[in-house]
Image (cartoon, rainbow, N blue to C red):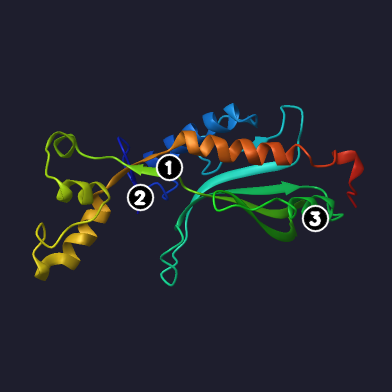
Amino acid sequence: MMMILGLEGDLFDPKSEACKKSLDRLRDVMVDAGFHVWKRSPRESTLRAYLTKEDKYPLLNPRFVFIDKEDDEVRPTDYIVVTVLSKDRSGTYSSHLDGFENTPDEFFVRGDTFADGLQYHGDFVVPLPVVEEQDADDKDEDLGDTTSMEGEGETTDAATPPSDADTDDDDLVDDLEWEIDHAALFESMRLIRAYLGTLPPPEQTVEP
């Protein structure tokens, strides 16, 4: 569960205020990064984005995703996943997208499936850039090292009785509110848009 500052519900619940309004903010970021993005229908849990207003494909469907990875605590588990769809079944788009230079901040995962008249090429994956929002009392009160640790969502032995440490840590994680770092997200979306702009035009691909 992820709580977004000032919004109700879980970011990963498509019906929540947190998810819907965060998608609207994601739309603004993608538009600034050069995409054409249709306004989201209240019933939709993803966005519909294109390279330009005139292009019908590739169709991009960004959404917020939580991936449970208990065996790998080093890698983040919260992502923005941008699915890439088109009508190109020649393999041209898939091969080209597979050449994307992956980084820890944005990477492409290939997947070739044809369903409902569309070719699924894979997903651009962006670890969700977030910052923890401190309470006003925490910002005003100078508690030395303890305050610094709490700002990172951690507790010290002095702040939490050892017998209750496990329970309190779980409660703290659930109670934390976060803000999406839109500046960092813009840079990732800008890079993805630039790479998608190098795709061959649809007339140069095969559509059986």
**Element assignment for label 1:** helix
Figure check: 31 above or below 172: above
What x and y, as percent, mark residue 19?
A: 43, 42
Residue at screen point 17% across, 61% down: 168
- Residue 133 in sight in this render: yes
How far across and down, in percent of the image, does residue 36 sit?
A: 65, 29
- What's the residue type where badge 3 is placed? Ser
x and y percentages locating residue 69 in the rendered image = 45, 67
In the picture, measured across the screen, residue 150 lies left or right of residue 109, that is left
Of the two numbered discs 2 and 1 on the same chain, state the one appearing first in sequence: 2
Q: CA distance from mark 3 to mark 2?
A: 35 Å
Residue in view at x 70 percent, y 60 percent? 111
Give the image location of residue 184, x and y in percent.
49, 38
The residue that disc 1 covers is: 19
Q: Which residue is painted at 57% across and 44% down in the image?
A: 62
Say which of 64 and 127 sits in front: 127
Amino acid type, mark 2: Met
Which of the two residues, 62 or 108, is positioned nearer the viewer here?
108
Above or below residue 28? Residue 89 is below
Q: Which residue is label 3 attached to?
A: 95
> Disc 3 to disc 1, how far (Cα)?
32 Å
User: Quick one: SS at disc 3?
Assistant: helix
Residue type, numbered disc 1: Cys
Choose the circle earlier in sequence order: 3 or 1: 1
- Name the side, left or right, on which 73 lies relative to 38: left
Of residues 82 and 134, the one nearer the viewer is: 134
Label disc, if present, on residue 2 of the rendered structure: 2
The crowding category of the residue bearing disc 3, from other C-alpha atoms within 10 Å (few below 14, some 14 to 19, many at least 20), is few
